[in-house]
Amino acid sequence: MDRKERTEEKVQELFRMPAAGDEGTDGEFMQILQRYIFGDLCYTGSLDNRVRELVTITVLATIQALPQLKAHLAACLNVGCTPVEIREVLYQCAPFIGFPRTLNAISAMNEVFQQNGIALPLPKQGTVTDQDRYEKGLAIQAPVYGTEIRDRYTWLPKPFDEAVPRFLTEFGFGDFNTRAGLDQKTRELLTVIILASLGGAETQVRSHVYGALQAGSTREEVVCALVHASAYMGIPRLFNALNACKDLLAEQA
């Protein structure tokens, strides 16, 4: 297939509609957009439609492109993503992009779910209590990241020298990474995408690329996810992310 044929095939798979033609005010731009994303990127690398769409909604939630997010939430459903795993992808954005933007994404998600006849609320996926969220979060955090954050911020004035690392463990890992509905390999891969999409978080990108590799992603899968995300977050953020962890992602002889 040529680019045009590949684009038509992928747009039909994702959106159940024809690819862009010359109609409308900006048909030429839409053809450039679609042939690059759906004719080139979607056919480069190993990730399947399901993971690519989870990557896409992660970027769109992070950058708050809500109209496009709604379209790709529907595409997620079209390629077999479950409502629960879609919700988990958006929920886990909160520690990185903040609650207001996460709530915006959740509102868009619920609108799409209702349009598709999906009953709300979805089943709960939490696995921790107020009493054990620290211990369960630490059980995920410590084997991969050790005590790096706790050791790095001992200089903070009290009580923040203790509170900041504890909040990270309880909130970032305990409240979200312990939830059911999305496997740890996918969670870590999508965390890389959130951080790359934010821009300016290259230190954290590097840490979570290491985490993604530890969780079972291959170097090719991480690069494929970042390259796919670049159509939405922009190429400069792709290069920033790749340069930040070149030694982790470089093909080894």
Image: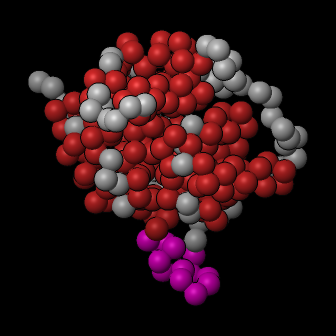
Which residue extends farthest bottom?
Answer: 25
Residue 7 located left or right of residue 193: right
Residue 197 located left or right of residue 252: right
Of the 4 image quadrants, the one containing the C terminus is top left
The spot of residue 105 in percent (x, y) is 64, 53
Q: What are the residue bounds of the magenta stretch?
A: 21-32
Q: Residue at x 22, y 37 (%)?
A: 245
Question: In this picture, is 28 found above or below 120?
Answer: below
Q: Residue at x 43, y 19 (%)?
A: 141
The spot of residue 135 in percent (x, y) is 53, 12
Query: Where on the picture, by quarter, is residue 93?
Result: top right
The residue lying toward the viewer, choosing from 13 and 118, is 118
Which residue extends farthest front?
Answer: 158
The residue lying toward the viewer, choosing from 151 and 39, is 151
Q: Is residue 177 magenta?
A: no
Q: Residue at x 69, y 23 (%)?
A: 126
Query: Where on the picture, by quarter, is residue 79?
Result: top right
User: Can residue 91 be seen in the rendering of this structure?
Assistant: yes
Query: Where on the picture, by quarter, is residue 202?
Result: top left
Colour setting: secondary structure
Q: Residue at x 55, y 30 (%)?
A: 171
The spot of residue 13 in percent (x, y) is 63, 49
Question: In this picture, is 143 found above or below 68?
Answer: above
The spot of residue 71 in percent (x, y) is 66, 58
